[in-house]
Image: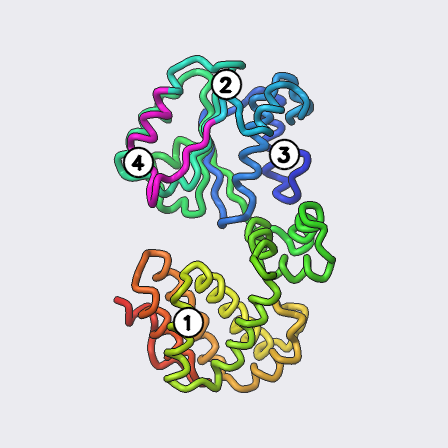
Amino acid sequence: MKLERIIGHEHIVTALRRMVEEERVAHAYLFAGPSGVGKATVAGAFAAALLCRQPRSGDACGQCRDCLQVAGENHPDLHRILPDGSSIKIEQVREMLRRLVLRPYQGERQVHLVMDADLMTAGAANCLLKTLEEPPPGAVLILITARPQALLPTVVSRCQVFTFHPLSVAAVAAILDRELSLPPAEAQTLARLSGGCPGRALQMAAVEGGYGAEREKVLELAVMMGRATGGEALSLAASWAEDKQRALAGLELLQMWYRDLLVWRETGDGEMLINRDRREAIAREAARYDRGGLLSRIRAIEETRNSLAVNVNTRLALEMLFLGLAGTGSPAVAAGAALG
């Protein structure tokens, strides 16, 4: 991937190309933004430009040996540090530092991409800090994170920070068209559901059996939930708890559904809906809830999603949530509070 092929993030791409062209490359960068927004894609394209022997207008040529190696993911001076389990450990950072003190194999630079940098242990972060304070010649570190607030402030302060924001629906749809040649209507729907994050849209499109079918199931459940008994809610929770990742994806869809009900109730503007192709059902269901009930549902789902991300008991979390969602009044149980 070349920088010129990046769709969206124009101001960031322009700034990075100018740095390469004017040879004003910093030793450390922090790419921050939502998961799937395109940070890693831009970082990879930037790395290609940094390692290219014949960059053109601040971008990789795409034809030289270095560019072909980057594309083939076998360039000896490009390294990716990934979490080992749930964290990036101090041993991984020390191994990176051992490489950094050596001369680059082929060119003038070494580029290290630290994925999910917020998962560094305290020891790993402090170890990295020493290198950021006294970087070796030719070393370029790119830290990538969806949670910059979880990084040590001293680490952040020694990086040039680029903040990535969600893309427009049109930009995400254009990426889906280029990568998957999806029909325009399907691309538009996925783009809206992705929240401006093309990586998430591509993941949705890759769901086995079709994302549309999975979405249909969740939306049917959302309508049913307004009429569910406590026993039915517990049964649904048990079913969802069998697959945590699928449950997380379903909760996101469920949250979007209640968000659309609230938007319709407050504005009646169909153009503001995420699930525009369900406008009639949204108008019908929105009339059954009051504003407080919808806001409580959206908050309860958000709390449960956050709780599941830190490995609480999945079934218990879903049971508390679904019991609260059953019916049309304000949830009687706050899922997050119930989980402690």
Question: In terms of depth relative to the viewer, which is nearer, 95 or 238?
Answer: 238
Question: In terms of depth relative to the viewer, which is nearer, 150 or 199?
Answer: 199
- How far separated are the C-alphas under marks 3 and 4? 29 Å
Amino acid bearing label 3? Met
Residue that badge 1 annotates: 239
Q: Give the mark nearest the N terminus, 4 or 1.
A: 4
Residue that badge 2 annotates: 109
Dot 4 alpha-carbon crowd within 10 angstroms: few under 14, some 14 to 19, many 20 or more:
some
Question: Where is 6 relative to 67, above or below?
Answer: below
Amino acid bearing label 2? Arg
| Residue drawn at (26%, 35%) of the image | 123
- How far separated are the C-alphas under marks 4 and 1? 35 Å
| 1 and 3 marks in contact (CB < 8 Å) | no
Amino acid bearing label 4? Lys
Assign a secondary structure to mark 3: loop
Q: Does the magenta run of residues contain 197?
A: no
Q: Give the mark nearest the N terminus, 1 or 2.
A: 2
Q: Does the magenta run of residues contain 85?
A: yes
Give the numbered dot on residue 89. Answer: 4
- How far separated are the C-alphas under marks 2 and 4? 24 Å
Q: Give the mark nearest the N terminus, 3 or 4.
A: 3
Image quadrant containing the N terminus: top right
Q: Position of residue 143 (x, y in %)?
A: 44, 35
Image quadrant containing the C terminus: bottom left
| Residue drawn at (68%, 53%) of the image | 173
